[in-house]
Image (cartoon, rainbow, N blue to C red):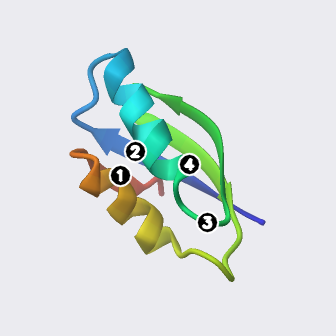
Amino acid sequence: MSKLELDIEGMSCGHCVAAVSEALQELPGVNVEQVRIGAAEVTYEPAQVSPEEIVLAVEDAGYTAQPRA
């Protein structure tokens, strides 16, 4: 398992947190460690999903995401 921390723009409330959590939980091989306004931390199985796919899932939910440097 690998760890990925994301900075997420556009989140402002509990509904946003729930939407991002749900989007991440739907991905195969992803375990959601924490989602809070402005950020998320996940562990994932690189053989099943890429960091790019994780970012795209957040963006498909309506937010802007990028891996934390």
Q: Position of residue 37 (x, y in %)?
A: 39, 25
Q: Amino acid at mark 4?
A: Gln
Q: Amino acid at mark 2?
A: Asp
Residue that carries the numbered disc 2 in the rendered image: 7
Name the element at disc 1. Answer: helix
Q: Are marks 2 and 1 in contact (CB under 8 Å)?
A: no
Q: Position of residue 40 (x, y in %)?
A: 51, 40
Mark 4–mark 3 distance (CA, rounded to whole Å): 8 Å
Q: Quadrant location of the N terminus? A: bottom right
Q: Amino acid at mark 1?
A: Val
Mark 3–mark 1 distance (CA, rounded to whole Å): 14 Å
Q: Position of residue 21 (x, y in %)?
A: 49, 38
Q: Amino acid at mark 3?
A: Pro
Residue that carries the numbered disc 4 in the rendered image: 25
Name which residue lies at 43% across and 71% down: 53
Q: Quadrant of residue 12?
A: top left
**Badge 3 or badge 1: first in the primary sequence:** 3
Mark 2–mark 1 distance (CA, rounded to whole Å): 10 Å
- The correct choice, above or below, for 69 with respect to 1 in the image is above
Q: Position of residue 6 (x, y in %)?
A: 46, 49
Residue that carries the numbered disc 1 in the rendered image: 58
60 left or right, relative to 40: left
Residue that carries the numbered disc 3 in the rendered image: 28
Mark 2–mark 3 distance (CA, rounded to whole Å): 21 Å
**Badge 2 or badge 1: first in the primary sequence:** 2
